[in-house]
């Protein structure tokens, strides 16, 4: 987060402050970091909540969760008018 703008860093720090548990899947960002995060989330959840558009990484992770016997709930994506 050190390279993020102040607003993003402040939001990130606020989330960390409120979190009961923090799990890091990598020490720094790499091209595969998002996939490692998604795999970790899918493997360690009992219910996968997601808002996704078909063909995205989130949609693929939700499908993987289904294939692995997880309960999956698709949340609607609301757009500002």
Image: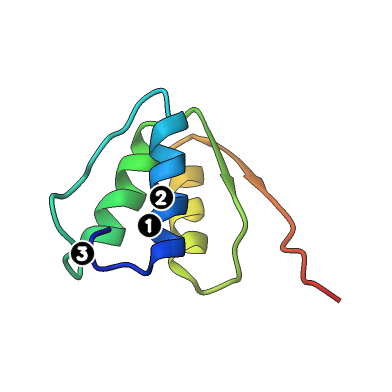
Mark 2 burial class by Cα count in 10 Å: few <14, some 14-19, many 20+: few
For mark 3, give the secondary structure: loop
Residue position marked by numbered label 2 in the rendering? 12
Of the pair 27 and 40, the residue shown nearer to us: 27
Q: Is residue 42 visible?
A: no
Say which mark, if any, is on residue 61. Answer: none
In percent of width and height, residue 66 lies at 51, 44
Which image quarter holds the C terminus? bottom right
Asked whether residue 30 is in view, the answer is: yes
The residue that mark 3 highlights is: 32
Q: Are marks 1 and 2 in contact (CB under 8 Å)?
A: yes
Among the two numbered marks 2 and 3 on one chain, the one whose residue lies closer to the N terminus: 2
Q: Is 44 situated left or right of 70 in this image?
A: left
User: For the point 50% across and 35% down, which residue is it?
Assistant: 70
Label 3 packing within 10 angstroms: few (<14), some (14-19), many (20+): few
- Disc 1 and disc 2: Cα gap in Å? 5 Å
Graded by Cα atoms within 10 Å as few (under 14), some (14 to 19) or many (20 or more), the crowding at tag 1 reads some
Name the residue rendered at 38%, 37% in the picture. Answer: 16
Element at label 1: helix
**Residue 9: numbered disc:** 1
Q: Quadrant of residue 24?
A: top left
The kind of secondary structure element at disc 2 is: helix
């Amino acid at each position: 987060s050190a390279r993020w703008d102040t607003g993003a860093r402040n939001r990130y720090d606020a989330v960390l402050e409120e979190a009961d548990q923090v799990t890091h899947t990598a020490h720094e960002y790499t091209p595969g970091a998002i996939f490692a995060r998604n795999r970790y989330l899918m493997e360690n959840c009992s219910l996968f909540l997601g808002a996704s558009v078909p063909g995205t990484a989130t949609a693929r992770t939700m499908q993987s969760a289904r294939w692995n016997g997880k309960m999956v709930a698709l949340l609607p994506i609301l757009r500002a008018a």
